[in-house]
Image (cartoon, rainbow, N blue to C red):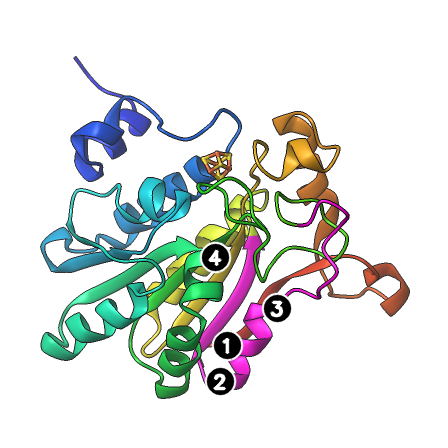
Amino acid sequence: MAIGFEQYLQERYLRVAEKFSSNTCPGCGLGILKGLILRVIDELKIDMDNLLMVAGIGCSASYVGSAFNVDTLHTTHGRAIAFATGAKMFNPQLKVIVASGDGDLGDIGGNHLIHAARRNIDLTVIMANNMLYGMTGGQAACTTPVGALTLTTQKGNPYRPFDFPKLVKAAGAAYVARYSVTQPLALMNSIKKALETQGFSFIEVLAPCPVQFGRRNKLDTPADMFKFLMDKCISAEGLEAEELRDKIITGELSDGG
Ligand code: SF4
């Protein structure tokens, strides 16, 4: 019996436990990110025997970075880039993708991130940003927007979030971009470019977390959370400063050229 494209991708690229079920909460955006990475791997015909996936701890690490049926390092919290760097040093021919979350790569592993970018190490880092720590109960992260309610900021987060694409670009990365899972085609193209870049490539991916972020911030359903990101995430091209106020700017900051 012929199988559909979706099933072909699952059969070919996912671990058994990931094939027929989703371990994420209903309405989570991480499944979209995983599906887009799958499609790019298939399109670029990346050799699965020469691909290493590295993840830290958290929802993104578990449901994206550790889901693929390839050699995988599911590392300690915040240390994914350090492990990935070691693997790349040992075998420079390896294609190495780090897929993990904002708490893992940005908070706990932030120093590894900026130094790997500074050294322009040939890794592709995909940082799923759900704007807090999802798996551990919804604590504030360094990506939580000002005023947002989390488990640890019940009167609103008082701190400015990091702008990771700017930080990583300033540190020296070859390719830097930010997209949302609500911009799937642009995000897929960006993942392709990142994987084809020689040197450090980094994509921040906004991914809705309706359970920990949405329900605390008056975005009660997954649809509300998706709509929030669709309204917030826009390209700056052709827009005035006033139109960009309170928006999350998406696009490429550094194109690997
Ligand atoms: S806690 Fe949030 S990020 Fe984690 S699986 Fe649930 S919806 Fe997704």
Q: Tag on residue 168?
A: 1
Is residue 163 toward the left or the right of residue 227 in the image?
A: left
* Image mark for residue 162: 3
Asked if the residue at tag 2 contacts the one at tag 1, i.e. Cβ–Cβ closer than 8 Å, the answer is: yes
237 and 130: which one is in front? 130
Sequence-earlier tag: 4 or 2 = 4
Residue 165 highlighted magenta (yes or no): yes
Residue 140 drawn at (x, y percent): 60, 52
* Residue topped by disc 4: 103
Task: Identify which amino acid the numbered label 3 is placed on.
Answer: Phe
Where residue 5 appears, x then y in whole percent? Answer: 30, 28
Q: Which residues are magenta?
A: 153-179
The residue indicated by pointer 2 is 171
Q: In the image, what residue type sits under mark 1?
A: Val
Amino acid type of the residue tagged 2 in the rendering: Ala
Name the residue rendered at 34%, 66% in the picture.
124
- In percent of width and height, residue 160 lies at 70, 66
Residue shown at 24% from the left, 27% from the top: 19
Q: CA distance from mark 1 to mark 2?
A: 5 Å
SS for tag 2? helix
Which of the two marks, 3 or 2, is nearer to us in this view? 3
Separation of disc 4 and disc 2 at Cα?
A: 19 Å
